[in-house]
Image (spheres, rainbow, N blue to C red):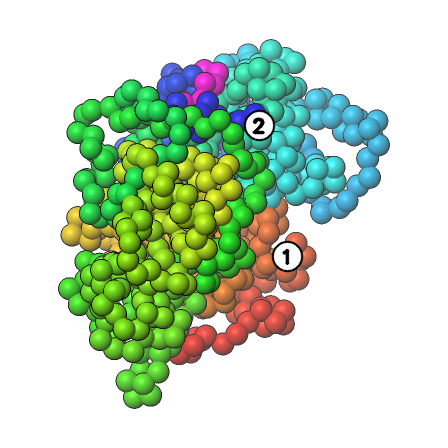
Amino acid sequence: MQLYCNSLTQYTRLKTLEVKIGDLLLGNFHPVRVQTMTTTDTMDTLATVEQSIRCIEAGAELVRITAPSKKEAENLLPIKNELRKRGYQTPLIADIHFTPNAAEIAARIVEKVRVNPGNYVDKKKFEFIEYTDADYQEEIDRIRTRFTPLVKICKEYGTAMRIGTNHGSLSDRIMSRYGDTPMGMVESAMEFLRVARDESYHNIILSMKSSNPQVMVQAYRLLIRNMEDEFGICYPLHLGVTEAGDGEDGRIKSAIGIGTLLEDGIGDTIRVSLTEDPEFEIPVCKDLVKRYEGRNGVGPQPPAGLLSSAGSLPSERPDPSTGSGVSSGEAAPAIPPIEKVPYSPFDYRRRKSVAVSTIGDHHVPVVVADFRKAAAIGHEDLATIGYSYDPASDKWNIGDAAADYLYTGNKTIDFELPGTLKVICDHKTWLQRPDKQKYWPLYQGKEYLQPGEHSTLLNFVSVDTAGEGTEELLQKIRQDNTVVLCLWSSHPNAMPSVRRFIMELMNRNIDCPLILAVDSADSSIDEQLIHFSTEAGALFLDGMGDGIWLMNDPDKLVNARVSGRTYLPAKNNHQFINNTSFSILQATRTRISKTEYISCPSCGRTLFDLQETTGRIRSITHHLKGVKIAIMGCIVNGPGEMADADFGYVGSGPGKITLYRGKEVVKRGVDSAIAVEELINLLKESDAWIDPPFVAIR
């Protein structure tokens, strides 16, 4: 199978063309550039300048400013002049939707323009149109006529361009021929790219953004393959998950989409789209990018074949930042190449596995809560993983985000557990337990081969995918329908190490369930969110996990700074890990446990206080499990960008909101003072509302 990157096992950057944006060079192995977008009114010159400076001083290497009409495009000149007067030379980008004449003005002023092929020439009315090949070619000719003037201006002025496809704003023409698919996203960009190439203009960056990380990742992979097939080269790529939201969920969704591609050496510039002030996007970008600095060095190639070992669980191994048996500063061993890729990276299909108890096969991925470091475990501790105990009734209340398994290490629990919670403990501890239907053993790799008592129903086996030689173990597992493998890697590049191991299992038709274990030694919450999301999320996006097991050292964790405040996403570390586990599964669409919010990051087009409104809607709808609500600042990010949302809350004018059910407009011109209440009424009318537990609606 033709791939989309240089290697699935050895990290190398994808070679792309070099693009010049002002004095900044991008692509062709230059550092991955970080950028953001202002949220001020572009006509407010001073506010836009001041916010741009805050972003630049936070580390932004490019700053994007919306230019929805000619007047905003013209006002980019005084903004640029004031920034240059104050000594800031950072390239500026004009963000264009719908308005070619604004793009043509902006291209003469700023260093880069962004156009959306879904609405630069085409319009979106959600209509299906039957095209003959001749009719379709007429539409392409129309694009060429309208788009070529901008290309010529960019070429004359040395202005760079981003052709930025968004999943939710594909035109009716593209939707009619290709459907709502990653391939439709790719072809939407390729049509514009062909026009630019015909004019010998190559100062181009491309993006394939979606609020769904799975769609986004597949689209980028397809784009790379198509560019290589058609042109023999690849243009630089701007990575981002659009409308990711805010807080913990926004960071997780962004890290899954962007990090999955960065893991394979893909990406030349990134933007994390959070519903927060833009300067707070930059630290998240930096945390993502720094994971891949200096990754090219590897040591001697080990023998080909399946890598595994009888390694212990991650928290009992050497510091993961140095790898297993690899001293700091020493090159890590290379991960052997894989001869056969047994899955399609362009289409989601969950890896086939047998069911062991409620793990694998058709079951949703399970969540393991790690309590090995707890001094003791009481009723109140289980509240942090979704189980609250009522002493008066002697009953447990179980939340939607309740862990399925509890790992206790060598400890046991001296009270009756809720019926849905099972315990994993070390094998030696399990042997001492009389209630072997509630406790299940964990073996450290080859320990499973030793004679002695095993469970007849369920056995967990921990394997370090970067270790060596467990052929005998795998042969036994092949014949044992009680084993669940818990995979982790001591290799510094852990995700490709685990991925290679899983591909080898698939090639050998070993179909036991797999729990993905990720251990983070990062010192901040943001870094840990990125670490967990990238390494576990990348594998879930390719259908490779039946469970998730996150671990960290809470003693090394310090508070992160988000939106100018100290950010603690949970009351304690166990709650943080449990929330993160369920959020990763939610973002990869593999297990839905809560409401999903598709929220744009705000910009100068936004028609209401997006952060305040998002917070308010979240506070009264967060209990609606599985419902997807889009909160969009303006019509540009409206019905199109909402993609697959169930309900939409979209700014349609100053102080006015339009409400959507799917892609259908239900109410127009709703006063923003009552729009949230009207959204709740719409949810009730659509039978999507349930009263929240314990909380009165105000």
Q: Quadrant of the C terminus?
A: bottom left
Position of residue 356 relative to residue 240, above or below, is: below
Identify the mark nearer the N-term, 1 or 2. Answer: 2
Position of residue 463 relative to residue 207, above or below, is: below
- Badge 1 crowding class, 10 Å Cα cut-off, few under 14, some 14 to 19, many 20 or more, is some
Image spot of residue 382 (x, y percent): 29, 69
488 with respect to 5 (left or right): left
Q: Is residue 682 magenta?
A: no
Whole-angstrom CA distance, mark 1 to mark 2, is: 37 Å
Q: Secondary structure at mark 2?
A: loop
Check disc 1 and report the residue beneath it.
662
Judge whether residue 30 can be spotted in this image: yes
Residue at left 57%, top 15%? 232
Camera-side residue: 161 or 529?
529
Which of the 4 image quarters holds residue 170?
A: top right
- Badge 2 crowding class, 10 Å Cα cut-off, few under 14, some 14 to 19, many 20 or more, is few
661 with respect to 84 (left or right): right
Image spot of residue 58 (x, y percent): 28, 35
Residue at left 46%, top 22%? 6
Check disc 2 and report the residue beneath it.
1
Camera-side residue: 642 or 89?
642
Image spot of residue 89 (x, y percent): 34, 22
Residue at the farthest bottom position: 392
In the rendered structure, which segment of residues is drawn in magenta?
13-20
Q: Label 2 sits on what residue type? A: Met
Q: Label 1 sits on what residue type? A: Gly
Q: Main secondary structure of the magenta part?
A: loop
Camera-side residue: 129 or 479?
479
Which mark lies nearer to you, 1 or 2? 2
Residue at left 33%, top 63%? 440
